[in-house]
Image (tube, rainbow, N blue to C red):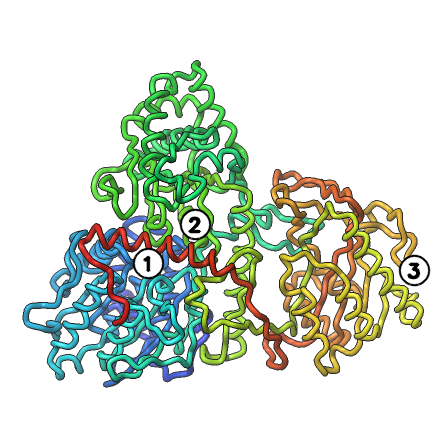
Amino acid sequence: MAAEIAEAKAEVTRQMEDVEILHRHSVMRKRDRWYFGAKPSDTHWPALKAYLLAKGMDEDDVEAVDEASNEVVSLLEDPKQNDFQCRGLVLGHVQSGKTANMTAVMAKALDAGYDTIIVLAGLTNKLRYQTQMRMFRDLVSRHPIDWQQLTPNEEHLDFRAPPQGGFLSHSDKSQLAVVKKNPAPLKQLKIAVRGTHALALKRLRVLVIDDECDQATVNAGKGEYDVSAINGHIRQLLSMIPAVSYVGYTATPFANVLIDPFRTDVVGGVDLDDLYPRDFITALPSSPNYFGTEKLFGRIPDDPDNILPEEEGLDMIRDIPEGDEEAMQPVSAAERDTFEAPVAPSLATAIRYFLACCAARRARGDADEHMTMLVHTSAYVVAHNRIAQSMSDWVDSVRKDIVDPASAEGQLLAAAWTGEQGRLPADITAAAAVTTEEIFAHLPAVLEALEFPVENGVSDNRINYEGAPRTYVVTGGSILARGLTLDGLMVSYFLRGAKQYDTLLQMGRWFGYRKNYEDLPRIWMPLDLKLAFRGLARVEKEIREDIGRYHDENKTPMDIAVRIRSIPGMAITGASKMRAAKTCAISYWGTHRQTFRFRHHDESELDANWDEAAALLNAATDAGLRDDDWKVPLWRGVPRELVIKFLERYRFHPDHADLQPGVLLPFLRQPDARLAEWNVGIVTSGKGKEALKALGPLETFGLVNRARLKDGGPSADIKALMSKTDLWLDCEGTAPAGHGWELLKDRRKSAIGQLPLLLLYPIDRTSPYTGNGDNRVALDAASDVLGVGIVFPGSATEGGEFVAVELMVDSVEDLERIEAEEAAAVAMVDAEEGRTGAEVQP
């Protein structure tokens, strides 16, 4: 027993030790360390952790929440200080469990000395209530005696200033207010703060959590010096509290990182900063169990000659034909009132598949779980009810036949189910496979439970996941695109596009966790929308890479401006939120760039690019720069002027915004000795088809093979041109194995010094697909293609010269239309809740 006591004592001692918080995911202002992790004696986090585990959250995911929330809490201000103002931003992923991190941060902050939590939660009662109940279940109900709730667990109520005129400021209780981001409740919040006794207010240690902080919070006043109402209320509120940390949470930080860090506005005689996250920006890592953009659309392959299945993405997206797309949407606003919503063939297939999925989950023992299909076809509210009614009528018309496997409808449902089997990796789920016979056995129960709610600001038939399990085909618009969680979402039928990054990404309600049904989710969308999401996946990855790079550089948020790639035809965020983002700073040092999109049917462009490469190689050969003894075609010490001449004349696909001459060439022309001389190499293939035409001095060589993605649209998208080993083309020996891109570039610099490398890829016009998946097809170009890769010297973590680039935005008319739709959605909610919404200034 003595030994066991000693062991227990050692374990308790270990748990009570300070934990070193590693800020691995943050760009931050330097400050004194004050938080060293949760203690066993804490009240809120141990209870929350136990609850998360008890409700079935994966242990590894709980540990990840624990670690990430430690990082965020340690970046708040120390509540032992008397006065402080902290501004932070936490970047999660859509439907990724960022609310779990948010809740963990709240729990640990309270344990560490904060006493009041204010959560700013969405623009609607529905979103506020959803967050309120989440906080109640996860935090308050664990220790109800320790809490003072300042907002009710009722959907149609919100914060009201207490009758005594201020916060209660219990010394022995934690206070919680979950407040809608609308002027009326924010005014009430300010009244409560203003009415709190000065001594009591000074004792408060307040944590403000701004959920979906890129929505409404960011100043969107129309004029340069206007302050939008919600933004002004939040800034005033923070200025009134002596000790407050403000943390914004979002999956779409585009507007937030474009806030002017140095802007202040005088409101009511007080200078108000504009909520830029000056103290820290934290990018939360995602769990391996999370279905996000990278899992759906894949990642850039390390070796295009040997593409791994996980690099290609999951085969979960189905096309909506152009005819169905046109039939399911009003042609214009003028025709929305007369719009008759048919059930297009692709929508009927999606419904059949959803019914089969619901039956499959019942066969797996999940009958007591919520199951949802999302139909998002139009921003117009008038269309929602008609679409929902059409779907309900269609199901009623086939209800008797569809349960009969021998009927025509039964066969179509069986085909919808069997056609989706075997299209995903076999190990994607541990759940049992489901036969068609099992589907039909459970189908009557599915049809009995099926409901068709409409989720918008004026609907009386809305979703409600409280209580008994629901089986929903839910139709909606803007409200569904922001923050509202759809439980058990398996099928999405998605038409409505958006021309803003933040709006588009937030529409991805299908992202998230799908425990025990990882194999079932499918998304129907038009091709152009799929291409936009694929491009957005690159943008999202680049933002996180930039934050990681700034972390390595020990930069602070005030030192940086996160670089955001421009996708043609899209705006980063609303025009009124972009006043501080007139230019974008781009550095190429230590990076590599490559062409992966080509206008493969434009024979004249393809031939012109080939001829420009030939001219470059001829000029370099005439200058005696070819290394005749090298293992591959290579020219050393090529003058910068020849390289610039080639890049100036090569016609890059418009999607390669960072390779356009107006962006790239100013960087190359800067007076830096590292850019004076280049190595130029040709990447050929010993296994490839022999070229039929010369490439300058090269007459005999093997073409490389690059099949294109099947659904790349009018252009060919090969996803990746370069292999990691290509970086070693001008180095002795073979490329070191097992290294990532960055480490391999460092090894190259150690081997040959700071030499830029231009790589030319002659690509076989046919390029047949030799893999086993369904994502790619033969390139089938009009002529052989000339791809370009560039490896820049220097380090991604160095300072030096940057290029200022004008950001591409939509037309003013398009942006005003987008913002008008969003404003109309908010106005409908205001009308429903009896508000005027007329306030413009705080």
Residue for badge 3: 697
**How far apart in space, not on screen, are marks 1 and 3 (Cα)?**
60 Å
Instruction: From the image, tell me which residue sits under label 1.
Output: 99
Q: Is residue 288 above or below residue 420?
A: below
Identity, as a three-letter code, of the amino acid under mark 1: Thr
Please tell me in which quadrant of the rendered image residue 652 appears: bottom right
Is 575 rendered above or below residue 518? below
Question: First in sequence: mark 3 or mark 2?
Answer: 2
- Which residue is situated farthest in the top direction here? 406
Q: Is residue 112 above or below residue 671?
A: above
| Residue at the (23%, 65%) spot, across then down | 183
Q: Does label 1 or label 2 sit earlier along the sequence?
A: 1
Residue 192 placement, left or right of 587 = left
* Amino acid residing under circle 3: Pro
Q: Residues within 10 Å of mark 1 (few under 14, many from 20)?
A: some
Which numbered tag is attached to residue 434? none
Query: Residue shown at 22%/62% (left/top)?
Result: 179
Please name whichever residue, 613 or 370, is drawn nearer the observer in this view of the structure.
613
Q: Earlier in the sequence, mark 1 or mark 3?
A: 1
Quickly name the residue at label 2: 508
Image point (28%, 38%), residue name: 453
Depth check: give the residue in front, 417 or 87: 87
